[in-house]
C-alpha cells in the first residue's frame, strides 16, 4: 500500500542483526523534521510488451494449508517474468475457500514491486473448497464497472492455483464454461497444487493439459508466459537526501468574530488536524505565528517563540483559543500579518530567503474589504490561502477569492477536500529539483552497532548530521553516568551502560541459554530542550550464559492485575493496518485485545457507538449484538485456535449518522479465569446469544499447534512482551467489575472519520496504515 509521511511522533523502524536490534520508538513528541536516510525518486519507465489481463484465483482452503506458500511462490515467479504496466500485464487476485474475497482488481497496482509487496500480506483463510463459487465470483468481479478489465481485444487469462478437489461439483466445470462464454478472449490455465492433484478436473477447466503446470513440470511455468515478457527502459534518477522539511514562515490568521462563534470549534479542528497535522514546526523547517481577530487583531506569538516552536505546543495552544466575538476586521488582521511577514527585525524570527505564507480562516463578511491589503501582500511575494468551514449561503465566497487572489487557493466546504493538494505544495519534503514519491519515509541512516558483555551494553550511533546535544538513557537524563554531552562535529557517538544502572534491563532467554539486554536511549539534538528532531532508540542484544531454571520460570510469570486492553478498527483484516478514516459501506474489522495471562479469556460487552449528536448501543451486557446492521456478535475463535495470539474480532460495514462525520466506539472488557471451576464467567465466553450469526472468515496467520505455542519461540515472545510491559505501564481505565468476573476495563477506539464517498477523500490525503 502506498503511503504518505504521516505526522506521527518519531516513526517506528526495526532493524534486526544477528544478536542485536535497534528500533526507533515513539517518545510522545512531534514528528522529526530531520531525516537521516537517502530516499530515491521512482524512475519513469517505458514499457514494451503485449497487453494481458491476468486473473489469479488462489485456493486458500484448509486442505492446502501447508501448500499455501507454494502457491504464493508460483504467483511471484509469474509476476517477475511478465512485464507489468498499464499498457502491458495488469493483475487481479481473488482468494477463495468456501467463500471468496477480492484482494485487488486491475486498477489497484500497476507496478511489480507493489504487487509483490501485496503478496506479503496475504494470509491463509482455511475452510472447504468451492471452485465453482470462485469462478462465479470472478465472473461477477470482471463484469463490475471499475474493475479495470479491458475490452475484448486484450487477452485474458484466469490462472487457477488449486489441487482441483472441490465440494461444489458440477458447478465448477459449469461455471468455467459460463466464464468462457460471457467474457470475450478469455482462457483458463492452472497450477496443480501439492502432490495429489485432480488432473482430470483441472483439464476440464483448462480444456488442455498443456495449460497445466504441476510440481513435476515447473520448468514450463515461465515459458508459458514468454509472450508477455517484454522490455522496460527506465531513466536514471538521482538520489535525494532530505536534510529538513521545506522551510516556510507561516502566519495563521484566524477569524474569531461573532459570525463564526457557532463554528469556532470546527475552525480550530481544521487548523489542528489539516494544517498543523501536515507540517513540521521547527526552527529549521516551518515557523509559525498566530493572529486571531474580530474588530481588532491579537498577535499571540511570533515566528521566534521559544514556547511554541514545535507541533505539540502549537496544537495545544490552538485547541484552547476562544472566540472573541464582535465585528469582523479582516483587513486589520492582514495588516499585522503583513508587518510580521515583511519585517526586517530578526527578533521576530522571520527568515530571509524563506517562502512566506498567510493562511486566513474566515467566513468573509469583513466590515471593510481586505482586497487592497491582500493585493499588497501578494505583490510582496506572500502566498495567500483563504479557508472557510462555513457552509453556503452563509459564507462570502467572493471575499475569500479576493484574499487568495485565485480560486484554487480559496476553500469552502464544497471544495475543502482539495485543500491538502494545494497546501502540501509548500511544505513537506525539501529536495531541490526533485519531487519525491508519496511513499518516501524518514529513517535512521547508517549502522547502529550494539555489543554486549555479561554485565554491560556498548552502543555506537552514526547520524546524518553531528549531534551537538545529549545522549542519555531514558528517564536517567540527570545522572552523569547515564548521560553524555556532545559538542564536537563528529557524527559518531559511543556510550557504555552497565548492568543494574541507567535502566538497563537484563532478561533470561526462553531456552535458558543466555540473557537479553535492553535499554532505551534518547538522542537529544539540542543541549537544553527536547525538540522534534530528537529520536528514541530501543536497543537490545544477547549474551550466551547458563540461566538457572528457577530464574527462567520466574521471567514468564504475569499478573492478571497488570492486564491492559486496547480496541482498534482495522482495514483489510483484523491483523492488518489501523483505519482512521473510511467511506460508508467499506469493510472494517473491530479488534479487541488484552495482554492477560494465558488462563484468562475476556468478554467484550456493553459497546456503544458515539458521534457528536448520537449514542447507540451495539453490544449488550452479555456481549450479544443489538442490531446486526451496526455490529454482529464478536468472534472468539482465536482463544481456541490461536492461544498465543488471541484476540476478539468482528467484521463491520461502515455506517454514519446523518449530519455527523466522526464516530467513536467504546466497550467494556471483562476478564475471566477459565481454569477456575468456581468462576461462573467461564460459561459465558464466548457469549451464548439467542440468534447465532455466522461470522465471515478472514485472512489469518497460519495455525499454531499447542506444542509450538509452548515452544522456546513462544516463551521468548512472552518474556519480551513482559519486559516491555514492565518498562512502559500506562494508566488503564478500570471500571466497576462485572459480576462473576475478575476485572473490567473500559476501552475505546480512535476517532473514525466517516466519508460518504471516496471522492470526498483528498487526492493527496494521508493514508493511515498502521498507527498503533
Image (tube, helix red, strand yellow):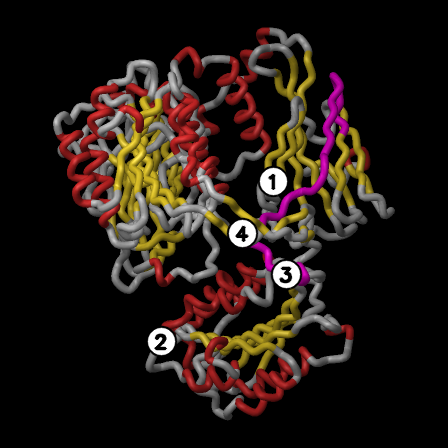
Rendered location of residue 408, percent (x, y)? 47, 76
**Residue at 23% across / 46% down in the picture?**
184
- Is residue 418 located in the magenta-colored stretch of the structure? no
Sequence-wise first label, 3 or 2: 3
Q: Earlier in the sequence, mark 1 or mark 3?
A: 1
Among the two numbered marks 1 and 4 on one chain, the one whose residue lies closer to the N terminus: 1
Q: Is residue 763 above or below residue 126?
A: below
Q: Which mark is residue 406?
A: none
Q: Is residue 90 left or right of residue 540?
A: left
Residue located beneath label 2 in the image = 391
Residue ID at (35%, 81%): 394
**Spatial distance from mark 1 to mark 3, Cα to Cα?**
20 Å
To which residue does mark 1 refer?
25
Q: Measure the C-alpha gap from mark 3 to mark 4.
A: 36 Å
Q: Residue at x 32, y 51 (%)?
A: 148
Of 431 and 728, the residue lying toward us: 431
**Magenta stretch in the rendered image:** 431-458
The residue indicated by pointer 3 is: 281
> Quarter-wise, where is residue 55 in the image?
top left
The span from disc 4 to disc 2 (Cα, nearest Å) is 44 Å
Q: Position of residue 598 (x, y in %)?
A: 41, 20
Amino acid at each position: 500500500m502506498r503511503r504518505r509521511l504521516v505526522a506521527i511522533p518519531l516513526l517506528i523502524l526495526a532493524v534486526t542483526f544477528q544478536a542485536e536490534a535497534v528500533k526507533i520508538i515513539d517518545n510522545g513528541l512531534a514528528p522529526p523534521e530531520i531525516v537521516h536516510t537517502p530516499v530515491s525518486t521512482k524512475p519513469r519507465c517505458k514499457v514494451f510488451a503485449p497487453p494481458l489481463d491476468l486473473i489469479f484465483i488462489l485456493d486458500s482452503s484448509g486442505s492446502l494449508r501447508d501448500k499455501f506458500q507454494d502457491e504464493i511462490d508460483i504467483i511471484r515467479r509469474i509476476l517477475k517474468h511478465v512485464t507489468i504496466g498499464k499498457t502491458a500485464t495488469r493483475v487481479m487476485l481473488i482468494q477463495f475457500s468456501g467463500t471468496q474475497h477480492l484482494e485487488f482488481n486491475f486498477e489497484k497496482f500497476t507496478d511489480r514491486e507493489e504487487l509483490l509487496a501485496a503478496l506479503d500480506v496475504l494470509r491463509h483463510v482455511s475452510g472447504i473448497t468451492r471452485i465453482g463459487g470462485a469462478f462465479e465470483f470472478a465472473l461477477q468481479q470482471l463484469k463490475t464497472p471499475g474493475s479495470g478489465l479491458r475490452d475484448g481485444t486484450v487477452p485474458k487469462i484466469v490462472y487457477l492455483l488449486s489441487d482441483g478437489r472441490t465440494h461444489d461439483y458440477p458447478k465448477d466445470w459449469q461455471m468455467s464454461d459460463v466464464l468462457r462464454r460471457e467474457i470475450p478472449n478469455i482462457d483458463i490455465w492452472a497450477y496443480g497444487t501439492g502432490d495429489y492433484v485432480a488432473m482430470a478436473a483441472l483439464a476440464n477447466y483448462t480444456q488442455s493439459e498443456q495449460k497445466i503446470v504441476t510440481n513435476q513440470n515447473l520448468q514450463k511455468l515461465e515459458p508459458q508466459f514468454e509472450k508477455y515478457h517484454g522490455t522496460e527502459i527506465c531513466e536514471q534518477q538521482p538520489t535525494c537526501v532530505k536534510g529538513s522539511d521545506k522551510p516556510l514562515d507561516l502566519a495563521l490568521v484566524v477569524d474569531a468574530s461573532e459570525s463564526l462563534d457557532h463554528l469556532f470549534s470546527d475552525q480550530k479542528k481544521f487548523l489542528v488536524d489539516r494544517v498543523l497535522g501536515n507540517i513540521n514546526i521547527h526552527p529549521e523547517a516551518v515557523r509559525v505565528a498566530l493572529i486571531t481577530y474580530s474588530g481588532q487583531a491579537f498577535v499571540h506569538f511570533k515566528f521566534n517563540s521559544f514556547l511554541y516552536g514545535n507541533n505539540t505546543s502549537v496544537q495545544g495552544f490552538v485547541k484552547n483559543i476562544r472566540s472573541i466575538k464582535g465585528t469582523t476586521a479582516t483587513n486589520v488582521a492582514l495588516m499585522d500579518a503583513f508587518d510580521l511577514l515583511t519585517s526586517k527585525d530578526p527578533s521576530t524570527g522571520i527568515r530571509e530567503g524563506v517562502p512566506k505564507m498567510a493562511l486566513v480562516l474566515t467566513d468573509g463578511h469583513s466590515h471593510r474589504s481586505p482586497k487592497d491589503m491582500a493585493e499588497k501582500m501578494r505583490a510582496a511575494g506572500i502566498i495567500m490561502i483563504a479557508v472557510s468551514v462555513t457552509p453556503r449561503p452563509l459564507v462570502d465566497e467572493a471575499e475569500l477569492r479576493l484574499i487568495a487572489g485565485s480560486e484554487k487557493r480559496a476553500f469552502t466546504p464544497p471544495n475543502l477536500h482539495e485543500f491538502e493538494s494545494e497546501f502540501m505544495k509548500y511544505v513537506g519534503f525539501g529536495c531541490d529539483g526533485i519531487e519525491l514519491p508519496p511513499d518516501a519515509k524518514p529513517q535512521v541512516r547508517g549502522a547502529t552497532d550494539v555489543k554486549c558483555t555479561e554485565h554491560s551494553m556498548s552502543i555506537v550511533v552514526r547520524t546524518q548530521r553531528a549531534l551537538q546535544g545529549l545522549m542519555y538513557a531514558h528517564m536517567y537524563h540527570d545522572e552523569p553516568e547515564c548521560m553524555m554531552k556532545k559538542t564536537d562535529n563528529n557524527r559518531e557517538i559511543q556510550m557504555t551502560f552497565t548492568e543494574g544502572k541507567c535502566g538497563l534491563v537484563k532478561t533470561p532467554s526462553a531456552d535458558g541459554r543466555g540473557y537479553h539486554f535492553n535499554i532505551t536511549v534518547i538522542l537529544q539534538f539540542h543541549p537544553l530542550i527536547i525538540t522534534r528532531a530528537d529520536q528514541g532508540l530501543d536497543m537490545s542484544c544477547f549474551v550466551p550464559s547458563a540461566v538457572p531454571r528457577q530464574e527462567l520460570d520466574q521471567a514468564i510469570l504475569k499478573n492478571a492485575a497488570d492486564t491492559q486492553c486496547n480496541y482498534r478498527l482495522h482495514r483489510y483484516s483484523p491483523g492488518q493496518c489501523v483505519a482512521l478514516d473510511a467511506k460508508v459501506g467499506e469493510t472494517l474489522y473491530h479488534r479487541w485485545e488484552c495482554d492477560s495471562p494465558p488462563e484468562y479469556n475476556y468478554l467484550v460487552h456493553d459497546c456503544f457507538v458515539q458521534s457528536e449528536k448520537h449514542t447507540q448501543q451495539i453490544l449488550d451486557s452479555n456481549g450479544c449484538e443489538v442490531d446486526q446492521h451496526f455490529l454482529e456478535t464478536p468472534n472468539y475463535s482465536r482463544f481456541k485456535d490461536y492461544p498465543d495470539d488471541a484476540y476478539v474480532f468482528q467484521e463491520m460495514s461502515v455506517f454514519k449518522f446523518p449530519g455527523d462525520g466522526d464516530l467513536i466506539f467504546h466497550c467494556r472488557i471483562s476478564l475471566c479465569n477459565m481454569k477456575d471451576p468456581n468462576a461462573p464467567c467461564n460459561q459465558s465466553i464466548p457469549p451464548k446469544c439467542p440468534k447465532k450469526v455466522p461470522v465471515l472468515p478472514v485472512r489469518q496467520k497460519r495455525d499454531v499447534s499447542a506444542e509450538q505455542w509452548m515452544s522456546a519461540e513462544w516463551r521468548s515472545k512472552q518474556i519480551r512482551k513482559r519486559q516491555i510491559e514492565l518498562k512502559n505501564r500506562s494508566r488503564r481505565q478500570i471500571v466497576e467489575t462485572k459480576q462473576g468476573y475478575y476485572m473490567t476495563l473500559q476501552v475505546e477506539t480512535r476517532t473514525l472519520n466517516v466519508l460518504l464517498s471516496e471522492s470526498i477523500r483528498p487526492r493527496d490525503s494521508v493514508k493511515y496504515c498502521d498507527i498503533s
